[in-house]
Image: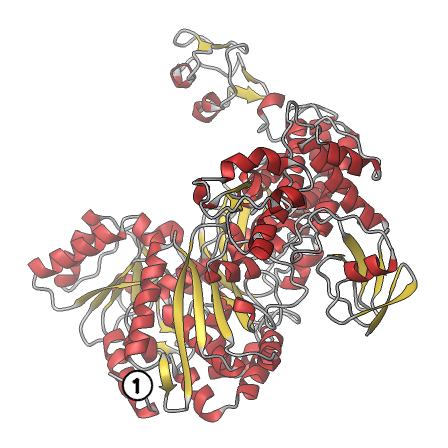
Amino acid sequence: MVTFTINGKEVQGQKDWTILDVARWEGIPIPTLCHHPAVEPYGACRLCVVEVDEGRRTRIVISCMYPVKEGIKVRTDTPRVQNVRRWIMQLLLDESPASSYLKELAKSFDVKPSRFQKAGVSFACHLCGLCVRACQEVVGIQALTFSNRGLKKEIASPLQMGSKDCISCGNCLYVCPSLGMEQLYARMRA
Amino acid sequence: MQITTLTDLEAVKARGLAQLYPEKPKILVGMATCGMAAGAQRVLETLQKRAQQLHWDGAVEKTGCIGFCYEEPLVDLIIPGQPRLTYARVDQEFAAEMMTAVAAGTVPEENFLARLDVDDMILDGGPRRFYEGALSGFVAQAPRYEDLDFFKLQRHLAMRNCGFIDPDNLEHYIARGGYFALHRALTSMTPEEVIEAVTVGGLRGRGGGGFPTGVKWASCRKAKGWPKYVLCNADEGDPGAYMDRSLIEGDPHAILEGMLIGAYAIGSTEGYIYVRAEYPLAVKTLQRAILTAREAGLLGQNIFGAGFSFDIKLNLGGGAFVCGESTALMASIEGRPGEPRAKYVRSVEKGLWNLPSNLNNVETWANVPLIIAKGADWYREIGTEGSKGTKIFSLVGQVKNVGLVEVPMGVTIKDMVNLIGGGVPEAREFKAIQIGGPSGGCIPRELWDLPIDFDSLWDAGAMMGSGGMIVMDNSTCMVDVAKFFLDFLIDESCGKCIPCRLGLKRMRDILEEFSSGKGSLADLEELQSLSEAVQDGALCGLGSSGPNPVLTTLRYFRDEYEAHILGRRCPAGVCKDLITYAINQELCNGCMACVRECPQGAITGEKKQPHQLDATLCIKCGACFEVCKFGAVEVS
């Protein structure tokens, strides 16, 4: 077992656990978006950031991937952590202001749409990659993938040609946090 | 032929030396990409054709780039018993004249750049003079390399062979001491001793981070897992930077030898060079070098009979900037999309295919044979306390001498700009230097006595990066510069993590408000806190260093931001929404130049009468400003 502290409280975890695993075990709240226990962590949304004091230096890490280490001091609510989370919420909400899921999530951060909010967007996909990972890791096929990069990045079938491999299992629909998959689903199929 | 013993190596060296210093005259043409772009191919063909016509008894060969990119195409004339003579900006016409003169036993005096008296031959026991005794005539008066400001502070260590050898010729490389360091490492040093030498030598990664190379090698050697990989990062993508390209094009075997020594030290049998496909000449040069080395037995099984085997594969990058990031590079080699991953487990432990992998930059690898051949203590002598050796910079932007510069660490920015670069154009003032590419920062004139090394740059908010240096004068708007680099990063972001994908875009949007006169001081605070969120939150180095151009310009040029926000004006006259053009009626002499140039027909007037500019039609393209010789077009 590895012993360390979260917000000053001494906690323990198995050596292959992440900080998030331990925090969930202990009931310490850490917000997440692209995390799901059924699939491998991906590290895209960055909402689960925490501040870790490793002795030599203090840095911001993502709790869903950072492996627990003996003696580290984790804080889940410092000003740096809050700043990152608040901005991520702000950026996401402005990207899809109509998303009921985001609106609900944004409440806990006290974030409202800003002057940069996109108008007339009903579709919401945050590229969390849960659908892609569920398809690959849980179903065992690759009917879904990422396409393009940067601001043009999107979820698509391989080569955007529609996938013949899709078995209509609905895992991607189930795991999607924002209901974006419902609108994408038809396009994924050959 | 197979090279398996020291005797073989010596024999090849003797043959190579006979080619490098022949008894007959020889002409070298700089044929790296910079030379080719300036027309070196045609120059080479002209020289060869003319030599044939004249039955000239000598050789015309190609070589790499020696660094004077602003003077390309460069041609060197090597006549036994004479210094090496370098000619600049050679065109086809002059090439033909030159050959005629040389065939007649004279040397041309036009287009002359400088003469080189001594070849450093760093790896091979010391300097070698091109001639003995006194010179006469024009050559005796000619400036030497070390008389040129551009060359004064330079010391070519990594670029030791660039511009001296034919990059495709293994014998040339061996003639200048190549592969002797590998032989020494394999036959008389243990892997631990090699790592020790690199650590004591103080070599730090030239790719940007400046991580101690020896420490990285040691952790990779210790890591459990097999096979281990040795990788070379040749995915150079910073705007304006091309050091790695020139090194590959000028001296590919230096990189192979470095990787071989590294592989021996780490205990690896397989290596990859990840090179961008946009560098076709570099790719070809590497392909040929790998093949030649394999044929000579310098890559493959049981090298030098020492029981050490290693081979290198070439992997072409598809043009994504982010693939220069170590984990994205490895994902790309594996055949997956080039996306970084979290590095909480380091790639020396779990890298390529989850196996221990050691990635170093092209320039780092090229430095390795030097340290083994000359010793760690020799290498430690060069550079500053924390940064040893030399660094190659590509000096570009608003300076007279644009080119590749290799200087010992610790040269000041002022010397870099004013001495080596020849200063900014007349009637302009040096304003800032952008160091380290999109992840670096802008350093202002107040700090130009700063020595250029890893730690000083880091403290100033910039970074060494791969070594791009863009000089900016007072015609550059710093808000515009920040926008430029953000545009680049937004375009190149892989899009995986939200702070980089959406955060950089938001920073760009806020800057756009400033440059269109809609900003407020509160937005500056917003920009600052967003920058910090992106720095802390982004997944990889590309994202987390993305705000640097904004943060350094905010730190050193806050007054310029405030001028945009409070004064609604752009002091450098760049941001179109904040400037107006007008014609000074007293200075205008009615030459009609601007009337003809204006694409909108916004300027009207008669000859010899002051012209009129219709502001409602003006699109602020600046064409009139550029064309006016009398300073009558004013920007405000």
Few, some or many residues within 10 Å of mark 1 (<14, 14–19, 20+): some
Reading the image, the residue beneath label 1 is B3
Left of B581 or right of it: where is A106?
A: right
**Residue A83 place in picture, x, y as percent:** 80, 44
Mark 1 residue type: Ile
> What colouring method underlies this structural image?
secondary structure
Can I make out residue B475 in this image?
no
Q: Camera-side residue: B509 or B124? A: B509
Farthest residue to the right: give it: A9
Tell me the subunit letter for badge 1: B
Q: Foreground residue, B572 or B309?
A: B309
Q: Who is closer to the viewer here, B421 or B458?
A: B458
Q: Residue at x 28, y 72 (%)?
A: B169
Q: Is A18 on the left-hand or right-hand side of B630?
A: right
Q: Secondary structure at mark 1?
A: loop
In the depicted view, which residue is nearer to us: B418 or B192?
A: B192
Q: Quadrant of residue B601?
A: top left
Measuring from the top left, give residue B368's x and y in whole percent: 49, 76
Q: Quadrant of the C terminus of chain A?
A: top left
Pick the quarter of the image with the N terminus of chain A: bottom right
Q: Position of residue B472 (x, y in %)?
A: 56, 42
Q: How many marks?
A: 1
- B477 lies above or below B291: above
Residue B225: horizontal and vertical position, in percent?
A: 56, 78
- For the point 60% across and 31% down, which residue is it? B572
Toward which corner of the image does residue B577 lie, by quadrant?
Answer: top right
- The residue that appears at 51% across and 76% down in the rendered structure is B228
The residue drawn where x is 67% and y is 53% is A43
| Residue B481 visible to an observer of this rendering | yes
